[in-house]
Image (tube, coloured by chain):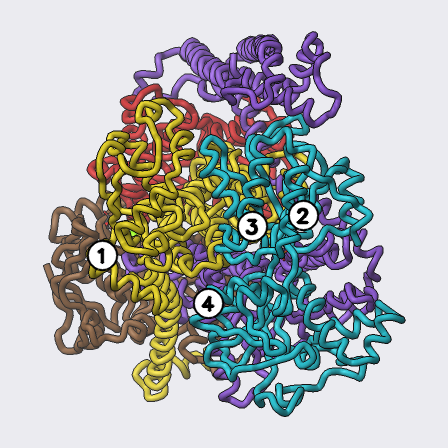
Chain colours: A cyan, B yellow, C brown, D red, E purple
Amino acid sequence: GGGAGGSRDQIRAVGSSTVYPFATAAAEQFVQKNPGRKSPIIEQTGTGAGMKQFCAGIGAQHPDIENASRRMKKGEFEQCRANGVTDIVEIQIGVDGIALAESNKGPGFRLTPELIYKALADDPFGKGKNKAQTWADVDPSLPKVAISVFGPPSTSGTRDSLAELILEKGCLTDPAMKELKEKDEDRFKATCTRIREDGKYVDSGENDNLIVQKLAANPNSLGVFGFSYLEENRDKLKDVPIDGVEATYETVATGRYPGARPLYIYVKKAHLGVIPGLKEYIEEVASGWGPDGYLAKRGMVAAPEEVRAKNAEIVRNLTVLDGSMLK
Amino acid sequence: MTSPPPDETLTRRIPTDWKGQAMQRRIAARYRAERRFRLIGLASILLSAGFLAFLLVSMLGNGLSGFTRTEIAVKFDFPRAPMVVDPAMLEGGNADQVLAGANLPVVTAQAANAALGEGGDALISSNAWLTVRDAIRDDPSILQREAVLSLPASADIDLAAKSQGTAQAEAAYARLKQGGHVSRAINMPFLTASDATDPTQVGIWGAFKGSLLTMLVTLLLSFPVGVLAALYLEEYAPRNRWTDMIEVSINNLAAVPSIIFGLLGLAVFLNMMHLPRSAPLVGGLTMALMTMPVIVIAGRNAIKAVPPSIRDAALGIGASPVQVVFHHVLPLALPGIMTGTIIGMARALGETAPLLMIGMRAFIASPPGGVTDPATVLPVQIFLWSDEISKGFVEKTSAAIIVLLLFLLGMNSIAIYLRNKFEKRW
Amino acid sequence: MTEQTTPSAPPKMAARHVNVFYGDKQAIRDVSIEIDNDHVIAFIGPSGCGKSTFLRTLNRMNDTVAGARVEGDITLDGENIYDPSMDVVQLRARVGMVFQKPNPFPKSIYDNIAYGPRIHGLANSKADLDVIVESALRRAGLWDEVKDRLKDSGTALSGGQQQRLCIGRAIAVEPEVILMDEPCSALDPIATAKIEELIHELRGRYAIAIVTHNMQQAARVSQRTAFFHLGTLVEYGVTSEIFTNPREDRTKDYITGRYG
Amino acid sequence: MTEQTTPSAPPKMAARHVNVFYGDKQAIRDVSIEIDNDHVIAFIGPSGCGKSTFLRTLNRMNDTVAGARVEGDITLDGENIYDPSMDVVQLRARVGMVFQKPNPFPKSIYDNIAYGPRIHGLANSKADLDVIVESALRRAGLWDEVKDRLKDSGTALSGGQQQRLCIGRAIAVEPEVILMDEPCSALDPIATAKIEELIHELRGRYAIAIVTHNMQQAARVSQRTAFFHLGTLVEYGVTSEIFTNPREDRTKDYITGRYG
Amino acid sequence: MSGTAITILIIGLGLIAWLSARARALRLAHAGRASPPSAPSPAPEARPRGPLLHSLPSYHGWYAAIWVAVPALLFLTVWTSLMPGLVTDRVLQDPAAATLPQDAFSRGAILSEGRAIAQGKAAAAFDPRSNAFVEPYREAQRFYSIGGGVIALLLAFAGGAYAFTRIRPDFRARTRVERLVMLGLLIASLIAIITTVGIVASLLWESIRFFSLVNPVDFLFGTKWSPQSAALGYGNENAFGAVPLFWGTIFIGAIIAMAVAIPLGLMSAIYLTQYARPAARKWLKPILEVLAGVPTVVYGYFAALTIAPAMRDFAVSIGISSASSESALAAGLVMGVMIIPFVSSMADDSISSVPQAMRDGSLAMGATTSETIRQVLLPAALPGVVGGVLLAVSRAIGETMIVVMAAGLAANLTLNPFASVTTVTTQIVQLLTGDQEFDSAKTLAAFALGLVLFIVTLLLNIVALQVVKRYREAYE
Ligand SMILES: Nc1ncnc2c1ncn2[C@@H]1O[C@H](COP(=O)(O)OP(=O)(O)OP(=O)(O)O)[C@@H](O)[C@H]1O
Ligand SMILES: Nc1ncnc2c1ncn2[C@@H]1O[C@H](COP(=O)(O)OP(=O)(O)OP(=O)(O)O)[C@@H](O)[C@H]1O
Ligand SMILES: [Mg+2]
Ligand SMILES: [Mg+2]
Ligand SMILES: O=P([O-])([O-])[O-]
C-alpha cells in the first residue's frame, strides 16, 4: 500500500464496464506472455467514477489506466490537470456496437430510427406528450403489441449512444428539427433525446444478461444492449433490422448498423516508466484489436483500419492528448 | 382486615361449570384456534424452508455441472513440434518464462488439428496451451517423446457436453464422442484457480480466499466491538442523553444502506487513511462497521433477556459488575449474540454493494496472499460472472453460488454449534 | 399404606401406583392417593421428597419439564388424565395450581388476575371482569394493598404480595380442584390467616391439596394428611390421627422433630 | 422508636434516618436501627411492609432497581456505605445476602457454591475449593441430598433445595454480615432446624439479620426484633420483651394475631 | 529488530509481569492470613480477617501486565506510523539522494523500490537507480527500529516497575483493571458515533455541492425524479424530486417486504420454540438463517426472472393491464423472504429466554399453548421481537440489488404493487456506477440521497427510542 511514495508492481485500471471484458482479455494475454508479471487489476467502476479516480493524481495509489466507453470530457481533463495528471495518452481501442433485439418468439420488428424515435421520445418532434401505446399507434404497419423496450438507464454511456446514434437520427427526419438544431442546440437535444418516462421504456440497470433474460421471458418486448450479448445469445434472440440493415459483426463494424460508439483507454504517461509492464500492456491491447485479434473474439468490434493505424501510432509514440480537442 | 368479599356474582359462578354446553363449545373453539395457530406456524416454516429449498435445488441444478469439465485427449509429438526448448533450461526457477516464448499456443493448435481434424483447435479451449505448459514444467522429459494430454474443451463444446450448447456445437461434440476423444472430469481448476476470461479456465479459489480474509477481518473487529458495545449500553451506561445518542446512532447504522458504508470506506479508509484499494482489509473494515450494529442490537436484546435475579444473585455474593457480566450475563446472552453474529456475518458474506465502492468489483486473476493484497469476494465474483457475455459463465455463476452457500454453512455451523452449546433455559 | 376414605362417594381425584422420573432419577415411587371435595389434603415431608413433583403430576404440569415421565393412573372424576384423549387445557383449567415460587406475569396486577377469566370467557363485560378481579384479590387478601395500583406491574410487588397475587389468579377461574404448593411460605401470619380462611371457605365445593412445611398449618387446614419421604408415600390418613398417633416411625420422627 | 443497645461496643452496622423510595412511592420511612455481632436481629411485619426493601438497602442491592432511591446514613464498621468512595463490590462481599426467592445460577450445584470463593480467591487449589463447597453445603443442610449430583444444574432442585443452595452460596464466602430474607420459607422443619442451628453457630462472630414471618422462629433465633409496618419501624427491642410485652398496640395486634 | 518481534517480546514481558505480580500478591495474601488457607476448616470457624488482599492476585497480575504492555504497545504503534517518514528523511541525508530525479513520482518510486528491497519485499529493482538506496535504507531502518525498540522496552520496564511498587494488600487492583475494561467498553460503543460522524462527513461535502445546484425544497418535496432531464438542458428543476424514491423505499422495504417477513418470521419462531421438537428446532433455525446469506444478486435474478413475470401474468389475469414486468411486489416479496431470519431468529431467541415459570403460570391457568404465546410470551419477549423487526426493516431499506433487478428504475409515485418503482439505494448505485461526470448534479444527487436517507432514518430512530423507552418492561 503506502502513501505517495509507495510503489506498485501491478497495473491498475479502472472505469467502464463496457470496456471491462476487453481489458481483462488483454490482461490475461499480457500475463501469459510475461509470466514474471503480476496480473493487472481491472476494476469496473463505470466511466465517470473511474475518471474521478484516474484524475485524482499521479502516484502509486492512483490507477494507471482509465477504461472509457466515451471520450473524456473537458471538465474531467481540467480536473486531471489540476491534480497534476497532465500527460494523458488517449487510445481508441475499438468500437462497441449497440444492438436492438427481440426474442426469437417475437413478432419480428423491422424498424427505422424514425419509428424508434416516435415510439420512445417523450415529446416527439416537440408536438406534445407521446401517446403511443402500441407499435401500431406509431405506424399502422407495425404489429399491435404494447410498446415495451428494455434499455440502459439514463446514467449510462450506452444510453447516450442510443440517443445520439438512433434517436437524434430519427428526430432529424423532421425538417423542423433540423432547423431547431441550427438555432437552439439545447432545445434540440431536449426534444430529440429525451425518452418517455411512463413505463414504456424500462430502465434496466447495468446488467445486460438480465436484459437478455427478460427479453426471452417477454416475447413482445425489445431490448437495447451491447452487440456482443446479442452474438452470444442468438439462440434466444434475434436482431431487429434498422433501415433494413441487420445487426451482424460486419454491419456494426462498418457502422452501417446504427449504434456504435468508440471505446477508449486513457493512460498516464507519468506512470509509464514507473509501473512495471505498463507499456507492454498497452502494446498487448494494440496487438489484439484487429478484426482477427483476440479482442474481437471477445465481442469487441474492431475500429476501422485508419483509426487503428492512427492509434497504433499513438501507442508507439505515446502521443499526449491535446485537451483542446475535448468537449 | 376488611369486610368479606361481595359474593353476589361469586356464588352464582361457583364453581365454574366446566362441563356445560357453553364451555364445551368455547373450548372447542379455542382448540380450533390453537390448531389454526399451530398450522400457520408450521406453514410459515415450510414456506420459508421451501423457498430456500427451491433456491437451492435450482442452484444445484444449474451449478453442479460447473464442477465438472469436458476434456479432450490430444496427442503431442514434442520432438517433431515446431518449438525449441532445451529441457535443461527448465530446471531453474524461470520455467514459465522459457515456455512462454516457446511457441506453445501454435504447437497446441497444430496438435489439436492433427488429432481432431481440421478446425480441431477451435474445439479445445483457447487457453489449453497453459495445460500443455504445466505438463511440460512438471515433467520436462515428455519433450523427448510423444504424449497424450487431456486438454480442456472449449466453452462451446463443454456446454454441448452438458447439453446446453448450440446445434453446431452439439454436432461437433457428437463427432468427438464417436472418436472417443472426450471425457468428463472433475473441474479441479475451478476450485484452485482464480478469475479468468475464459469460462473453462475460471476458478473460485481467489474469490473464496478473498471472502475468507474479508470475513476474518470483519469478524475480528465487529464481534468484540459489537459485544462490548452491547454490554456497555445494556449493563453499565448511565441513562442519559449521551447514551441515548450512542443507542440511536447504533440503531441507525443498522438502517444505513450498505452502499453508503461503501462510500464511507472509500472516503475514510482509502482517501483518508490511504489503505490499499481492493483489499480484504478495507472490505473487512467496511463490513465490520456494517455488521457491528446487528451484533449490538441482537446482543442487547439477549442481554436484556437475562433475568435480573441472576444479576442480583451474583452481586449479592460480592461479584463486581464486570464479573457479573462476564461470568453470568454474557454466557447466558451468548446464544442471542451468536444469532446476531450469524445473521450479521451472513449478510456481510452475501453483500456486494459496498464493495463496489472500494474497488472489489475487479478482475483479479491471482488469489490474495494477505489482507492487503488485491482481492475480490464471492458475491462480487458472482455478480461479475453473471454479467459476463459468454454463456459458459452461467453454470459457473451457479457453481460459485453453491460454493458461497457452502462457505456460509461452514461459517454458520461453527457459530450454531456454539449457540446450541450455550443455550440454557431458566 | 393407603388408608381409604369412605368408599361411598367416588373420589374427585385418585392417583394409583404413580411413579415419576426425571430422566433416570425416580422422584416419586408408587404413590396412590385420593383427593376429595369434602376434605382438604395436606402433603408434608422433608424438602426434596417429591411433594411438588407429585402435585405437578396432578394437573400434568410435569409435561412441560423436559425429561420428566409419569407412570401409573391418575383420574379426575373417574377419567384418566394421562389418557391421550384427555383435554389438557381443560384439565388445567379444572385443576388450578399455585406454584411454590411466585410467578406473576410481567403484566399489570389487574391483567394478572383477569388473564384466566378472559381466556375462559368467564366474564361477559368489563364490569363483570372488574367484579371478578376485585373478589379474587379480596379473597387472596391483597385487595387493600393494591386497589390503588392495579395498573402497576405484578412484578413490582413484594414477595408475599406476589404470592397472594398468584393465589388470586388461580382462584379467579374457579377451578374444581386447587393445588397449592406452599401458598403461605412468604406470608405473614395475618395474610396466612386470610388464605387459611379462604381454604376453609372453599372446602366442600372444591377439592383442595396443599403442600406445607408448617405442621400447625397442616393441622389447622387439612382433614387428611399425606407424609412423603424420599419419593414414597409413607403414611396417609386423617390429619388428627397422623399428628397424634402416627403409625410409621418415620412419620413420628418427622412430626416430633417439630419446630414449625 | 429507637431502642438502643448497649452503647459500649460500636455497632457493626447502623442505619440512621433511612428513607427508601421506589419512584414516587416511599417504601421505607425514617428507619434507624443497629445490627451487631453479638445478636441476631429479626425483622418482622406484615407482607409488603418494607422488610425486604430495608434489607436490600443494607448491602446496596437496591442500587440495581431502576428508580429506587435511598436517603439517610447506613454505616458498616463506622464507614458510610452510601459514600461515593465505598467499594460496593467489597461491601457486598462483606455483607452477604440470601434472597427471598431462591435464585440459583443456571450452573451446576458445585459451581453455584464455588462461584463466590473463586471470585474472592478464597481457595488456592481445587482440593481447597472442594472442601469449601462441601462445608458450605453441609452447613446449609444440603450435602446429603446433593453429594452425588454436584454436577447437576442448580435449577433442577426442589424449591427448598434451591433455597438451601442459596444459603450455602452466601455463607461460602464467609461474609461479616449475613442478611437472610425468609431463608426458611420453603423449608421443612428439619431443614429449618438445620438453618437455625447454623444461625446460632454463626452468632457472635457475624452480624445476622433475618426476615421471617414465623414468630416462633423469630423468638427462637433472634435476640433483637424489629417490627415494621407500612414502611415505618414501629418497635425495636429485645426479642423476648417484644414478644411478651410489646409497647406499641400495632405490635401487639400483629403478635397476638399469631398463627405461626 | 522487527516490529513483530518487539511486539511479541513486549507481550512476553506482560506475561511475565502478570505471573510475577500475581505471585507477589499471593505471597502478600499468605502473609496476611494467620492460618494457611490451604486448610480451611470445615468447622464453623470464620476465616481470619487480617490485612486481606483487596483484590484477587490475578487482578494484580493484570494490573502489572497492562502497565507493562499497553504504554509500550501504544508507543510502538505511534512509532511505526512515524518511522517511514523518519527513515526516508535519514536516507535523504545520504549522498546518493543528490542523484534522485526531481519529479516527485519517479523519485518516490525509486525510493520505495529501494525500501522494498531493503525490507526483503522485493527481489530486484525495476529501476536500477534504486539499488543505490538499498543500503542507506537498511541502515536507517535498523537505526530507527532499534531506537524504537529500546524506547518501547524502557517504557515496558518503567510501567512494570511502577505497577510493582503499587502491589499492596489494600491496593484496589481490581477496581483499576475494571475501570480499564469499562473504558474499553465505552470506546467500543463510541465507534458507532464515530462511524455516524464519518458517514455524515463523507456525504456532506458532495451534498452541499448538490444543493448548490438544486433547490433543497424541490429535492425534498418534488414528486418527479427524472435525472435525464437535468442532462438535457431542462435545468435541474423538476428533475430531482426525491419523494417517489422515498415512497418506493417505504413501499417495497417497509410495507411489502414486512408483510411477508413479519408474519412468516414470527410464526416460524413461535413454531420452532413452542411446538417443534428441540431436535427439529436445532436444525430448522440455522436453515432459515441461510436465507439471510444468499447473495442478493441471486435473489435479484430470482425475483426478476421467476417472480416478476409470474406477478405480471397474475396481474394481467385479474385485469390489471398496466402491470409491469418489473414490479414492486416481486422485489418486495423476495426481499421479504430474504429478511425472514432477521425476524425469526431474534424472535426465537427472545421467546425462548422468557423464563419457564411464565409459561408454566399461564399453562396452569388452563391456557392453550397459542394463548400462552400470544398473551404471555410475546408481550414478555416484545423488546427482542421489535428489535428483530427493526433490523429487518433496516435491512430492507438498505437493500439494493434485488430492487435494481426486479423493481426497475422507474420513479413512479404509485400505490399499485404491480407497477415498477425504484428505491433510494438503487438510484444511489445507478448514479454512482454510471458513466456520468463526477461533479454533475446527477452524480452528486447520490450523495444527497444518501444524506437525506441517513437523516430520515436517524429521526425515525430517535422517535423509536422515545417510544420504546415508554414501553420498556422487564419480567421477574
Ligand atoms: N421494584 C419495586 N418497584 C415498586 N414498588 C416496589 C418494588 N418492590 C417492592 N415494592 C413495593 O414496596 C413495598 C415494600 O416491599 P418489600 O418487598 O420491601 O416488602 P416485604 O416487607 O419484603 O414484604 P413480603 O413479606 O411480602 O416480602 C411494597 O408495597 C411493594 O409493593
Ligand atoms: N427438573 C428437575 N430435574 C431433575 N430433578 C428434579 C427436578 N425438579 C426436582 N427434582 C428433584 O426431584 C426431587 C423431588 O423434588 P420436588 O420439587 O418434588 O421436592 P419437594 O418435595 O417439593 O421439595 P421442597 O419442599 O424443597 O420444595 C428432588 O430430589 C429434586 O432435586
Ligand atoms: Mg417443592
Ligand atoms: Mg419481601
Ligand atoms: O460502464 P460504462 O461506463 O461503460 O457504462
Residue type marked 3: Trp
Lower sequence index among marks 3 and 2: 3
Front tag of 4 and 1: 4
* A92 relative position to E177: left or right: right
Residue D169, quarter of picture = top left
Which residue is rendered at x = 41% and y = 23% of the image? D121
Q: Chain of mark 2?
A: A
Q: Position of B169 compared to C79: left or right?
A: right
Q: Amino acid at mark 2?
A: Lys
Question: Do pointers 4 and 3 mark residues of a single chain?
Answer: yes
Query: Tag 4: residue type?
Result: Asn
Q: Residue D214's x, y, as percent?
A: 40, 47
Residue marked by disc 2:
A310
Q: Residues within 10 Å of mark 4 (few under 14, many from 20)?
A: some
C-alpha separation, residue under disc 3 versus residue under disc 2: 13 Å
Sort mark 1 into few (<14), some (14-19) or many (20+) by Cα contacts within 10 Å: some
Q: Chain of mark 1?
A: C
For the residue pair E185 and C77, the one nearer the viewer reads as E185
Q: Marks 4 and 3: which is nearer the front?
A: 3
Q: Cβ(mark 1) to ligand 2 < 8 Å?
A: yes
Q: Nearer the viewer, residue C131 or E6?
A: E6
Quarter the C terminus of chain A occupies: bottom right
Q: Are marks 3 and 2 on the same chain?
A: yes
Residue A233 - label: 4
* Cα distance between the residues tagged 3 and 1: 79 Å
Q: Which one is closest to the eye, mark 2 or mark 1? A: 2
N-terminal label among 4 and 2: 4
Disc assigned to residue A289: 3
Residue beneath label 1, please? C68
Please name which of the two marks, 3 or 2, marks the residue nearer to the observer.
2
